[in-house]
Image (cartoon, rainbow, N blue to C red):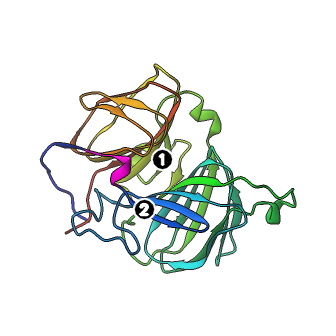
Amino acid sequence: MTITRPTPRVDVRRAGERFATRISWLDSKHSFSFGGHYDADNTHHGLLLVNNDDVVHPGTGFETHPHRDMEIVTWVLQGSLVHQDSEGHSGVIYPGLAQRMSAGTGILHSEKNDSWRLTGGDTHDKPVHFVQMWVVPDEPGITPGYEQLEIENELLSGGLVPVASGMDKHAGEAAIRIKNRYAALYAARLQPGQSVELPEAPFLHLFVPRGKVTLEGAGILETGDAVRFTATGGQKVTATEPAEILVWEMHATIAA
């Protein structure tokens, strides 16, 4: 991890430019190199390694698999996702519920669209749509952990709401804690005409998982578009239709 003074830049990445994995049960779009998709010039931005926009069909999902030394934040947009891991954590993640898993020294987990098996409810036929984001921790070898937090009420304000953070400035706020003191994730649900102002940081990543917004100085961003900011910030984001945005504020980057 490196703290640098980068050159100012605003880099718009359109939805259609993302890598895509489409199989029988999954439609996944990757903002960065992931799995069999590799581009040496597109491996991360700041501390963010993965920004996967996933749709999983009902009754299916990611079977048990390992992770290590990664902070994984999951944000559900529609439907419900079941998390189970080797540390004994299990739960149903749904819109407005923030979730973080610290892989640390090693953890096994699964993520499936089969909430009825955990809750005993009726079988449903709806896909689950979620964004999974990975950032590196401050240091390797930490104890694995899990945290989730309901922040639906905070989202009603229409402003940028801290979702997950390791930064000291968010220590007293309703945000799940991640093991990196240089990174924070915000979410906002915006109605037409509502605006938020982006934080200023060496590295920002703005993702529009649904809806349409206008970014000051860059124009219209639609569903699936993203922007990578370097050494800038403070721009206004204004919704032109009901929209949701995810913003990472990062004060360090992964060493090359």
Q: What amino acid is at disc 2?
A: Ala
User: Label 1 is placed on what type of residue?
Assistant: Ala
User: Dot 2 corresponds to which residue?
Assistant: 20
Q: Residues within 10 Å of mark 2 (few under 14, many from 20)?
A: some
- Examine the rendered structure and indicate whether residue 15 appears above or below residue 154: below
Q: Secondary structure at mark 2?
A: strand
As drawn, is 119 to the left or to the right of 218? right
* Residue at horizontal 39 percent and vertical 69 percent from the top: 34
The residue to which callout 1 is attached is 171
- The x and y percentages for residue 98 are 58, 50
The residue closer to the viewer here, 18 or 139, is: 18
Q: Is residue 5 above or below residue 20?
A: above
107 in magenta: no
Viewer-closest of 174 and 123? 123
Q: Quadrant of the N terminus?
A: bottom left
Mark 1 surroundings: few (<14), some (14-19) or many (≥20) residues within 10 A: few
Magenta residues (range): 12-17
Marked residue nearer the N-terminal end (1 or 2): 2
Q: Quadrant of the C terminus?
A: bottom left
Q: Position of residue 36 (x, y in %)?
A: 38, 75
Which of the labelled discs sits on residue 213, or is there none? Answer: none
Instruction: Write the residue at 34% across / 61% down.
Output: 32
User: Residue 141, how many percent across, how many down?
Assistant: 43, 78
